[in-house]
Each structure stands twice: as C-alpha cells, then as structure tokens.
Amino acid sequence: MNKIKKLIERLHITPLIFAKWVIVIGVWSGTLFSAYLLYIFHDLPSIDTLEEIRRSRKVTILDNKEQIISTYGDIYGRYIYYYEIPRNLKNAVIAIEDRKFFEHWGVNIWSIVRAAVVNLKAGYTVQGGSTITQQLSKIVFLNQKKTLKRKLQEVLLSIELEQRYTKQQILAIYLNRVYLGSGLYGVDVAAKYYFGKNVQDLTLYESAIIAGLIRAPSRYSPVANPELAGHRAYQVLISMVEDEFINKKQLEKATVMPVQLNTEMLGSKKRTHFTEWIYEQVERHVLKEDKDVVVKTTYNRNIDAIASTALKNQINKIEKEREVHEGAVIIMDYEGKILSMVGGRDFSKSSFNRVTQSLRPPGSAFKTIVYATAMERGYSPDNEIEDKEIEFANGWAPQNFNKNFLGYITLEEAFIKSINTVAVQLAESVGLSHIIKTSRKLGITSPLNHDLSLALGSSSVSLLEITSAYGTIGNNGYLLKPYGIIYIRNTQTGEFIYENPSEQSIKVLSDRTVGIMQNLLLATVREGTAKKAQSNFRIWGKTGTSQAFRDACFIGYTDKIVIGLWLGNDDYSPTKFVSGGTYPTILARDILRKIEAQQPSS
C-alpha cells in the first residue's frame, strides 16, 4: 500500500485519478484479451475433419530391374478400432505419454506446470506437458509453431474433442494418426514395417518400442538406432510398472525375449544418397500431381553394393593413419545412366551428397580439359614446352609435385607425369576463355576462376560434373548427359508422367582430339601418375590432388563404364599425404575389377 502511495505522489496525481486509470487500463486490457480470444475462436479449425486422412504423395523408387530400392511419403495402414488395439500397446502409450488420460478433460494443468518446472531447471526441454488429446489436436489440425496462438488453439480444440468423442475414440484416432518414423503413420503400419506382423500380434516389448517412438521417431528408431530404441522401450516398461499396468515379473520376462526386426512386409524404406537425389527430381517433375507414383531408375544394385562397400572399407582402414574421413563414388555407362552414386561413407550419419552437392577442386584431373582444349586448337602431343621455374607478375610461382624441373619435354610426357608448370604455360598460350568454353561444352556448369590456377584444377566442381566430362571423351567426343530416372508412372492409372527423353547425343570434341586424349589417358594409367590403376583390362584415367592434400581423386573409364572417386574431409582439413595416385586410384581399380568380374555390368 505504501508503494502505491509513493507511486501516486511521484506521478503528481490524486488517488481518484489513479483509480480511474487503473480501471481504464483494466477495461482495455480485458477488451483486448477478449478480442484476441474471439480471433482465436474465429481462426479455430473445425474438428469435423478429424477422421479424414490427409497424406503426402507416396513415391516408390525402383532399380533398373524394377525391384524396390526405397519408398518416400506418408504411409498409413488400415484403420484399427479401439477393440483391435492390443491392451499392452494402449497401456504403454498411456504410461509414457499421458498417465492421467482417462481422468483429465483434455488438458492436464498439473502436468503442464510440472513439465515447465523440470524444463526450467534443466535449461532445455526435457518433458512435455501435452496430453494425448492435445497431441491429437496438434498433429491433425495445427502446425508445430510454438506460439501463444497455437497453444491456445490446441487447448480449445482439446476441450472440444473431449466433449464430442469418448476417451476410447480419441485414443484410437490418435494411435491411427501418430507419426512413428520412416514416413509411417499409425500403429498398424508401424507394426508391419518394424516387426513384419499385424498390430494384434505385437509382444509387450514390441509394444513398448512403438510407444517409445512417439516422442522422437528418428532418434528412437529400432532400425537406425536399435540400442537407443531398447533403452527407450525399457523406460516405457518401467512407466508401465509404476502405473501398475504390468508387474516386475512381466517386465523381466519382456526384456529377455528376443526382438526380431523385419522390415520387408512393406518393401524397402532404405534411404541412400542416390534415392534422395532421385526424390528431389521427382518433386520437380510431377509438381502438382498428387497421386502416388512409381519411379524406375538406372540404379544397378550389384554395382552400387560393390562401390559402397569398397569405399567404406577403404576409409575405415586409412581413417586414423591418413586422416581421411569421407569419400564419394559415381559410376555411369556411356548412355549416361548412373549405375551407382555413393555420396559418402555412411548415409545414416550424413545425408550430404558429395557427388552432387559438394564442390571440390579436382586438382590435376582438370588438366585433361586444358589439354583437350589445346588439341582442339591445333596442338600436338609432340609439341614441346620447357618445364622450368616460372613466376607471374602477381608473385604466383607454380611448383611441380616433386619440386623438380625437366627442361624441354613433349606435351605427352608432361601430361603423363602431370607437370604443373607445363599445364600453366599451355593454359596461358591457349587462353583461359577457350578452356572455360571447352569445360561448358563437356557439361561443367560450376563457376570457374578466370586465372591461370584454373589449369591446376583450383576451381571447385562437383564429382558428377568432372566424371561426366571424362565420360564424353570415353564416348568418342559425344556429350555424356548423366541421368538417374528412366520413367515416372502414376501408380493408380499406370499413366507415364515423365520419361527420360531419348535425345541424340551432340558431338562436342573432334575425332582427332578424342583420339589424342584417349591415348594420353591410357598412357597415364600404364606408366604415369595413375599406374596403380593398371589391371588385366584397359583403364583410362587421370589423378588429381588439391593443395595441401585436401582432395584426392581418380577419374577414368573402361570400355563399358565411367568412374569418379574422391577422398577427403568435409571441413577441408588436409589429409596425411593422400594423393590422387595412391588410395583413390587403387580403390577405383579394385571397384572396376569387381565390376568387370561380374559380367554383365548393366
């Protein structure tokens, strides 16, 4: 009271005027709050659509033999009525998500307060205070934005749902609509996908695993993180014991029973760098098409298995010794069909695609384009250029890999030995604009530096780009356009929405240039920097190493296929002396040998 008096005295107003302003402010505040509530009510979604299922398009991706690689999109199973849902599953969900479900009126105030206190103490979100009814309101009618408006709407919708539906109906609808990871909605389809069985046949432990998924479907996935899923399921079982849904003996029995994952009932949902790349293209091709689609791709399951296994094993062997943590492989045929795209060592740990999304300096692998440009402009492999110390006006003085200079040598010898000073002088003589023009003709679209370091592969390009450029040389100078989709078809009608156009390939390099470059690339494998790629069949190729050994690659081809391989680190940290002529070349050779041995390769 004394504080109010002091405030009045400080404001130089009478108590009557002060009281008047308090009333005015109170009235206006009440009016504004009432208006806000009216706005919330006006914008409140209708619950009449509660039992309607709105889902995104299902995309089924097939390999080149029309076998399922992966599926994308929302997948709902058969609607399961309350009486069909096993008691253990219902109890598991209630125990871990909303213990007072059958007692509250849609909102549990004490649960919200308790969660707020726990979260405040922890400094981050540990517990959620939402009831099952609130969760149902959110997943069906609202978005995930954490705003006051959305929270108030959630409360109002929950109260309305509780008035119109029974607890049993609400729980059944919730268990048919809740997201359970991998594009799966509802317990019916989750039981089929994770355990290969109908929901009625779930064991107690399997029910606990599914209930545990609700809080964080990706984190607690039994497929991606079986150990975490097990820990979470145990927490669910402990909660069931505390709520007296099961006893300790049942808990002990459940935890010793083996759980067998079986993800074959619904077909594969395996995600790879290739399927992610394809899915992005599907979304562009079909646009407003809202029907389910089937996509046949160029993916060769056997070749991809060889490439992905070899890459992962190689990195595992040299990771600590050579400080190499990532890699990528791309394999295509001369029609442009991408047979394998391995965008990293482990997709489950990183979905970043190092074949298409990562732009890295190809090093000396870019010299092939420099030399091809020179040959197009009349140069010959017999022409000589002096391998000598050179320095430009800006102070740049390119060095050779071994720091030595050989004097006058032919372009053929300079290419085979990957002499830097010769490549730079050749680029200066030919002209950077012509080299960039050749790059564009070969399908490289990434920005290229207009300085002489371009000759040494300083400009970053994608592995897909540089590999397809080599493929054009292997394709006798006809432009190789890489692609992964053969067709997209409407699942319901069978109508073709998209088919890869069978365009006539464009000749972008002369026969003379192609012949010369093929001889140079073959000689590089036989006696040059790529000689570790030698095999009992012909391999053409070139190595590349960027500054400070940050990138190491081999790009080449055989009579049948084209391959690009890169090793390095995502953070651009240097490897421990890994050059293109070492592990990338050896790894490419081993992959090509295995592919050659399992004919046919398509």
Image: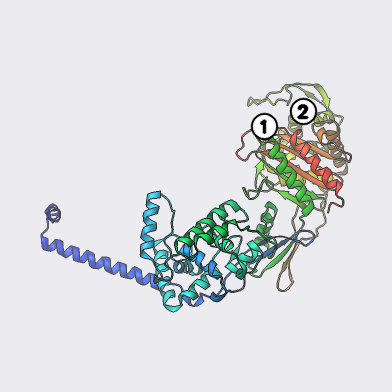
User: Which residue lies most toward the front here?
Assistant: 249
Q: Is residue 61 left or right of residue 98?
A: right
Which percent across, then down, holds residue 140?
51, 69
Q: Neighbour class for label 2 at 10 Å: few (<14), some, many (≥20)? A: many
Sooner in the amino-acid sequence: mark 2 or mark 1? 1
With respect to residue 36, does 415 lie above or below? above
Name the image quarter holding residue 564. top right
Tell me the SS state at disc 2: loop
Tell me how far mark 2 sits from mark 1, CA to CA: 28 Å
Residue 226, image x, y percentages? 60, 53
* Residue at image point 53% right, 56% down: 234
The residue drawn where x is 82% and y is 33% is 531
Residue that badge 1 annotates? 321
Residue 522 shown left or right of residue 167 in the figure: right
Quick check: 225 above or below 53? Answer: above
Q: Which of these two is toward me, 32 or 569?
A: 569
Please report the residue visible at 73 percent of the width from the left and 38 percent of the height from the top.
553
- Numbered disc in front, either 2 or 1: 1
Observer able to see residue 221: no
**Image marks 2 and 1: residues in contact by CB distance under 8 Å:** no
Q: Position of residue 135 (x, y in %)?
A: 47, 66
Which residue matches tag 2?
A: 419
Q: Nearer the viewer, residue 590 or 457?
A: 590
Is there any visible trace of residue 83 in the rendered image? Answer: yes
Q: Amino acid at mark 2?
A: Ile
What number is the disc on residue 449?
A: none
